[in-house]
Every structure is written in C-alpha cells, then in structure tokens.
Image (cartoon, helix red, strand yellow):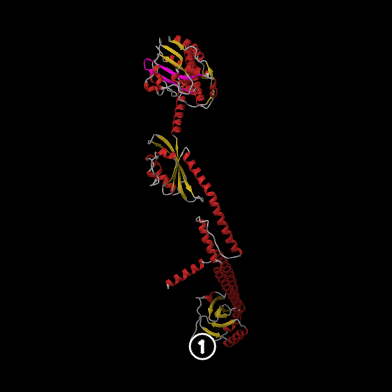
C-alpha cells in the first residue's frame, strides 16, 4: 500500500512538473478563488441553518409555554380525557409538532401523542421515563430546549414545567420539526456550491492538460536554450514552427543569442585589456595586496606584498596562506581571519613589527569580500602597508616635543623663581643681590629666546618652504661672522682668524642661510675651545679631479677649532635635534639645535656637512658649495630634497684640525 502511494505521489509530481509556470499560477488562483467562494457559500448556508435552529428554538419555547398554560389546569384536575382531547386537537392543528409527551413529577410518562401510555402498556408492557436534570422542573418555570439528529431529520426538543397555583405537576415535552422551506433552501445551496466547485476544477484540469500538450514542449526547449546561454554557449538556437506570442518569444530568443555571440566576439579583446590594466594596477601600487578565498588559499598577491614578506621566490598556490606568513603576522591574524571567513567581522586593522627579512613595522588591513547581495563571504582582501618611516617620524616628533617641552621648562622655571623671589623679598635683598637676580632672569630670557628662534628656524627649514639661491661671494659672510665674534673670542682669549684662497669664484647659495651656518659653527667652536686655543675658517677651491663628473667645481668651507673634541660614539648623533656634547660633560649651555639647523641649510644647498674630530685635539666641520654659473640659474629655486652633495668620505684625509 505504501509503495502504491509513493508511485501515485511520484506520478502526480511528474505530471505537475510538466505544467508551465503560467498554468500553475492559473490553477493556484482558481483553487484559491473556488475555495474562497465555497467557504463563503458554506458559511452562508451554516448561518441560515443556525438562524433556522434559533427560530425553531424560539418557536418551540413559545409553543410549549402556550400549551403548558392551557393543559396545566386539566393535569391538576387529573382530567385525562379532556387532556387527551385537547392535546390531540392541538397536535392535529399544528403541523410542526412531531410528538407530545406528559410526565408526572416523578418523570413517568403518563400520556403521549402519537402514542399513549395505555397503548404501550397493553401491547409491549413497557414503561417509559423522562430523564431530566435533578429538580429541574421544581426550581424553574422556564422551558429547556435541545436539538438532536434523527433519521427523519433534526428535531428540537422543548421541556416545559407544568405548574399550577404554585404546585409542580410534571413536565410537558414537545418535539418540533424544522422549517421545511429553510431546510430545502440550504440543501439546494449546498448542492449548487458543490456542483460549481466540481465544474470549475474539471475545467481547470482540462485546461491544464491542453496547456501541457500544446505549450510545455516549446517551454522546455526554451528552458534548455536559456541554460545553454547562461553556460556561455551563445550559438544556441531554437527551431520550432510556432506562431503567435510563443513564436515571437522564440524569435526574440534566437535574436538575443545572435547578438550575444557577436558581442562576445567584439568585446573579448577589450575585456582582456581591462583585466591586464587591473592586474598591472594591483602589481604597481605601493601597498601590498593579498586576496584569499574562503579556504584561506592565496588567489592573488602583488610584488609589494611578496617583497614585504620575503616571498619573491616562493610558490604560494599550494597550502593555507597562514603557513606562508611570518610568525609575528600569523599569531596576530589567525583568529581574525577565521572570524572574517565566518562573517563575524567585515574590517579589522593590525600593526605588526617584523624582524625578517628586515626590521620594519607594517599595518595590515583585513576586509571581507561579499557577494552582490552582501550576504555571503566570497573571500578576504588583505592590504599591507609598510609604515616603518611613519613610525620613526612619529617617534621623532614625540621626542622633539618632549625635548622642546623640557628645554622650555627649565628657563621658564628659573625666570619664574627669580621674579617671585624679587617680588616677595625684594626689600630684604641688597642692591647687588637684586642686580644679580635680574641679570640671571635676563640671561634665562635670552636663552629662552634663542631656543624659540632655533625651533622656528628648524621648523622653517624642515618645511616645504622654497629659498632663493643666487650668486654669493663667500668672503662676505665669513668676514661678517669674524667681525661679529671677534670681541667674544678676544674676551675668551681665543685666536679667531681665517684663510681664504684669493680670487674665489662666487657660489650658488642664500646669503642669510650661509651666514647662519657660519654663526652656528663658529659659535660652537668658541664655546668648546679653552683659553689660548684657536678657531680657523678656511675657504678654497676643490681640484677638478675631486668634483663629480658632470658637475661644476666646488668651494670647500672648513671651520676648525682646538677645543675638547667629539667622542666617536657622539659623532653619529651630533646633528640630531637637541643632542649636545654638554649632555656628556655637563659644563656648557646650548639648545642642541644649532648643528641640526646647519645640516638642513647645507642640504638645501644640495650638499652635506661632515666632521673630523678627536677628543682633546679639536674638531673640523666642512662642506662644499657649488660654484655659481649663469646656466645654473634654473636651480635658483630649490625645494626641500636631500642630496648626496659633493663631499666624499675620502675627502677627510686632508682635514686635520689647524694648530
């Protein structure tokens, strides 16, 4: 039996599958309409029947009360003959009454129509009792109504208590037939509804069979053709001799396939070119790009990512991508990658420090690749950025701010302390002490002014500001510096002199910036040279053999002293901001920005500053300046770009401190 049901079910499913979508929709719509109409009709029939039952109930109640009021005196007088005559007359005149039963207060039936108790007792010797709720008739004078179904139809039973002069005499039971007109009308409505429902479905089934026989086959051919087109077979054609709308559909399909075939032939080359452009763009971007599928396999990786992770000679197509990542990156990305594949996150950012193949800091961005509906994860895009220089710049910035804050705080604290002392104890101090405090505050103010000026100068030099480079006679800034510092050198008993080669050609430079360079170098030389020492400025032309090929000859500038010298471990950091030799010896003052300013100015002159120093012997700073020539005028506007300059490490052989 189960196998038979399975076969029938499969047959119905196969038969239903042969219908087109239009047929299924039509059948579904017809079913819905027929069900709704049938439901409404049955609801109407049921409502009519309910109303009929309610009317029968009301009619039976009224009829029972009327009859009970007339027969109660007869029952009270025990006048059975008159009771029988009146009841029979009432039964004959009322066609809707099916039966009439009289029971005493104990429930025993003593008279009934169409049969009587006497007749029953004489013929069958049976005694009938009326089963009602206990003490029902004694506690109420209202009738009780119920309905039950018999082979002859539905009957409404009415039980009316017989009460007379306050005395309970028994119960009157009436059987009321339903209204024959209402019953016939409801039955007719039901039969008509069933007939209409069956007729509609017969028409639907016949239409579906006809539709399946005439339309299903062309639709199947179209379906196969559409699948072939979707698979990329644009040579698919349908040849069926049909007319009408279906024929137009087949013609349009063939025309579409022909157009797609031509489009594919015409645009395949353009698509290939666009793909090549995209691959070239990905391969040339400065950031590393890696594309993974949902199985963590590498789909795409550009040369930048290979260089950052050291994958130049590694095959990445096999195995999980986590196996190829450096250990530092693998630890950070394992869990986030699995979360991204599971769709638990769309974008994350990490910062990782690498030690191989070189020490660097990278920023890694994870982004999930979703489908067009943005519901399913199709892959993971990883962007790798080398931020080593950015981290170094941030650290340098933080260090610079820290140094500036420290250097500003000391003179400000000293100034505030001395001024507060003068304000609070000025009258208790002697003139000499007040003068000493004011001189100290003035000295700290000058120190603070120098620091602020140096910071502003360094900030301008490290910005993108452009400086005008013109022809400068190098003798002029040197002589001006000598005049400026001559008095200071004499006070410290230091010999300050210069050696300038005669007839030096002008150099390409900025007079004010070069003056600042000489001032910083000479000021440092005087500061770190003891009494009896010497400071020498030299300027001479470099031999052409020392000049780089293709560049003009240069003028070398040297500033030498016989001071304390600079230790080898300090020579690498001497040009850093806020680094001071007195940080080691703790004897002299300074902002630590002078040599940083010198370095930046010389770099803006397309050169570099070098030094040769020996502790206890002295120090020589030197740099080269390009000789000015008229054809060099296009270089008059120089932006902030570092260059190697003309000086070489080998040039330091001839640079020993002047005695």
Q: Main secondary structure of the magenta part?
A: strand
Residue 601 x %, y %: 49, 22
Q: Is residue 613 magenta?
A: yes
Residue assigned mark 1: 120
Residue occupying the point 48% across, 41% down: 282
Residue 372 visible (yes or no): yes
Using a 10 Å C-alpha cutoff, classify the residue at mark 1 as few (fewer than 14 neighbours), some (14 to 19) or many (20 or more): some
Residue 382 x %, y %: 45, 43
Q: Is residue 1 left or right of residue 164?
A: left
Q: Is residue 437 magenta?
A: no
Q: Secondary structure at mark 1?
A: helix
Residue placed most toward the observer, 109 or 22: 22
Residue placed most toward the observer, 627 or 153: 627
Residue 534 x %, y %: 42, 11
Residue occupying the point 47% across, 39% down: 284
Residue bounds of the magenta highlight: 606-627
Residue 581 visible (yes or no): no
Pick out the residue farthest to the bottom. 122
Residue 51 x %, y %: 60, 73
Quadrant of the image for the C terminus? Answer: top left
Residue placed most toward the observer, 119 or 466: 466
Identify whether 54 is placed above or below 439: below
Residue occupying the point 37% across, 44% down: 323
Quadrant of the image for the N terminus? Answer: bottom left
Residue occupying the point 55% across, 54% down: 260
């Amino acid at each position: 039996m189960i196998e038979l049901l399975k076969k029938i079910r499969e047959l119905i499913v196969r038969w239903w599958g042969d219908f087109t979508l239009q047929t299924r929709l039509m059948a579904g719509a017809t079913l819905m309409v027929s069900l709704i109409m049938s439901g409404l009709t049955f609801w109407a029939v049921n409502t009519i029947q309910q109303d009929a039952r309610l009317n029968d109930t009301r009619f039976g109640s009224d009829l029972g009360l009327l009859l009970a009021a007339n027969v109660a005196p007869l029952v009270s007088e025990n006048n059975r003959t008159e009771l029988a005559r009146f009841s029979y007359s009432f039964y004959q005149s009322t066609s809707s009454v099916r039966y009439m039963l009289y029971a005493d207060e104990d429930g025993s039936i003593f008279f009934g129509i169409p049969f009587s108790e006497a007749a029953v007792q004489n013929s069958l010797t049976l005694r009938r009792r009326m089963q009602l709720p206990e003490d029902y008739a004694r506690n109420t004078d209202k009738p009780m109504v119920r309905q039950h179904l018999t082979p002859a139809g539905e009957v409404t039973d009415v039980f009316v208590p017989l009460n007379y002069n306050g005395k309970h005499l028994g119960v009157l039971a009436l059987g009321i037939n339903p209204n024959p007109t209402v019953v016939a009308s409801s039955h007719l409505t039901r039969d008509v509804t069933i007939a209409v429902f069956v007729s509609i479905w017969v028409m639907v089934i016949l239409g579906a069979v006809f539709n399946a026989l005439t339309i299903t086959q062309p639709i199947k051919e179209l379906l196969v053709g559409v699948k072939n087109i979707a698979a990329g077979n644009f040579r698919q054609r349908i040849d069926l001799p049909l007319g009408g709308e279906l024929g137009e559909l087949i013609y349009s399909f063939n025309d579409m396939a022909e157009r797609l075939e031509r489009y594919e032939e015409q645009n395949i080359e353009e698509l290939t070119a666009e793909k090549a452009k995209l691959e070239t763009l990905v391969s040339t971007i400065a950031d590393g790009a890696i594309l993974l599928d949902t199985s963590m396999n590498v789909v795409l990786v550009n040369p930048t990512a290979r260089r950052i992770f050291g994958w130049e000679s590694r095959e990445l197509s096999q195995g999980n991508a986590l196996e190829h990542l450096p250990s530092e990156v693998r630890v950070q990305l394992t869990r986030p990658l699995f979360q991204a594949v599971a769709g638990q996150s769309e974008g994350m950012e990490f910062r990782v420090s690498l030690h191989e193949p070189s020490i660097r800091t990278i920023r890694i961005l994870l982004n999930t690749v979703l489908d067009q509906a943005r519901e399913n994860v199709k892959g993971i895009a990883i962007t790798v950025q080398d931020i080593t220089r950015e981290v170094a710049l941030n650290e340098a910035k933080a260090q610079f701010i820290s140094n500036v804050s420290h250097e500003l705080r000391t003179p400000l604290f000293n100034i505030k302390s001395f001024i507060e002392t003068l304000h609070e104890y000025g009258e208790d101090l002697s003139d000499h002490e007040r003068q000493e405090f004011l001189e100290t505050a003035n000295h700290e103010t000058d120190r603070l002014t120098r620091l602020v000026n140096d910071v502003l100068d360094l900030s301008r030099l490290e910005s993108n500001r452009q400086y005008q480079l013109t022809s400068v006679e190098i003798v002029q800034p040197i002589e001006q510096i000598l005049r400026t510092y001559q008095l200071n050198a004499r006070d410290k008993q230091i010999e300050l002199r210069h050696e300038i080669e005669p007839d030096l050609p002008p150099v390409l430079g900025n007079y004010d910036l070069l003056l600042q360079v000489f001032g910083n170098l000479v000021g440092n030389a005087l500061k770190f040279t003891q009494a009896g020492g010497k400071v020498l400025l030299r300027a001479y032309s470099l031999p052409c053999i020392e000049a780089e090929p293709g560049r003009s000859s240069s003028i070398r500038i040297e500033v030498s002293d016989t001071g304390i010298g600079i230790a080898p471990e300090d020579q690498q950091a001497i040009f850093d901001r806020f680094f001071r030799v007195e940080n080691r010896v703790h004897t002299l003052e300074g902002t630590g920005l002078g040599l940083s300013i010198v370095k930046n100015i010389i770099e803006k002159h397309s050169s570099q500053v070098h030094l040769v120093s020996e502790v206890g012997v002295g120090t020589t700073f030197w740099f080269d300046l390009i000789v000015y020539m008229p054809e060099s005028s296009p270089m008059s506007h120089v932006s902030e770009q570092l260059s190697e300059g003309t000086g070489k490490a080998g040039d330091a052989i001839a640079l020993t401190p002047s005695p």
